[in-house]
Amino acid sequence: MEYRKRSKGPVILLMLVCILLSLAGGIWIGSSGSVVSSKIKDYLPSFEQEYHAPEQAPVVELQPVPEYTDGGYDTTDIFEKVNPSVVSINVYAGTSVSPVGSGTGIIMTEDGYIITNAHVVDGGSSVNIVFNDDTQMRGTIVGADADTDIAVIKVEADDLTAAEFGDSTQLKIGERVVAIGNAGGLSGTCTQGIISGLNRDVDSGARSLALIQTSAAINPGNSGGPLVNRFGQVIGITSSKIAATDYEGIGFAIPITEAMPIITSLIENGYVAGRAVLGVQVIELNESNGPRNGLPSRGVYIASITQGSDLAYKGVRERDVIVEANGKEINTTDDLLNELEKFSPGDVMNLGIYRPETGDTFYVDVILMESQS
């Protein structure tokens, strides 16, 4: 390749033009000391628009599987039907020019409600939605539930192509499915597989979820995208976070029938209403982290107590360990969560509390709070 020495004249002229344009356009200097032009600032997604919760969430009907028993659509037809309802999501933090995260979303309604995973938007302050025709819109995070890994985003629109949703309770093992998403940043990626299992209890780090297991490849970036049956109906929300937890070559999706009540509550309340919690931050004890800190090798260690929790008024304090709930032995956080799922906010739960300093175990009746996180 031949390189030629260039005259400095055009370079100097270009520098003068850039300086004049900067002075004319104005410069915004952030608190971090970085300089971002007002043009770039206007382009960045932000939360300046305020989300107003509707009086009632939009009703999305889950369609039954068609009565005819043929093989359904071929993969090409499924993709062409569903892809216009699939979006790429870029997540930004603060004044960052580059996204700090990305994922996939499903257009739920024509007026701009979009479903995705909670871990996709986690840590972000704003989102940018890219549609399959490459148009872009700013989005507002309506609500996110880390326990079920479901989130809802809203864009201001009225003519979007909404997906058709199917009844995930009608799924059968061996049924053909397709996953569509922004895998590895490659939008419109389509993979095919089958339903490998149903009602799989997988520990996602919070509450146990009865998930759809699939052989369709689900990669980072697919998170929040649709798992589609052979009739082009969305029957699950894929999650690469769950797939990557302790599994390899196995994909999981959140059943849409179970997800819809959570989505509705997020739209109407911004959180999942009716979920009972103790109001504590906890750490599960085991043989490794317990004894070396003077704690038991089982149970749930109370790291902090939320303001307003009834536990604080019953003499329970940080460093105490929950070892029993309603007569059931508590060895893990899953044990405690499983018991909490049986209750509603305002109900009373009896807890057995072990105090390491004295070696005593005592019992308290605690009024449960409603989770609004």
Image (cartoon, rainbow, N blue to C red):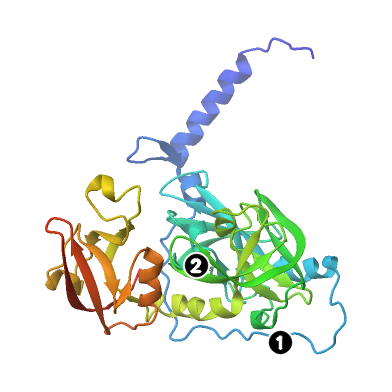
The residue singled out by tag 1 in the image is 64
Q: Quadrant of residue 258?
A: bottom right
Q: Position of residue 50 (x, y in %)?
A: 41, 68
Q: Of the residues under marks 1 and 2, which one precedes in the sequence? A: 1
Q: Identify the residue shown where x is 42% and y is 40%.
A: 26
**Which three-letter amino acid code belongs to the residue tagged 2?**
Ala
- In this orientation, does residue 273 appear? yes
* Residue for point 27% across, 56% down: 296
Would residue 132 be found to the left or right of residue 292 on screen? Answer: right
What element does badge 1 sit on? loop
How many numbered tags mark residues here? 2
Q: Nearer the viewer, residue 74 or 242?
A: 242
Neighbours of disc 2 within 10 Å: few (<14), some (14-19), many (20+): many
Q: Position of residue 88 (x, y in %)?
A: 62, 58
Q: Is residue 282 left or right of residue 316?
A: right
Amino acid type for the residue under numbered disc 1:
Pro
Give the residue pinned by disc 2. Answer: 151
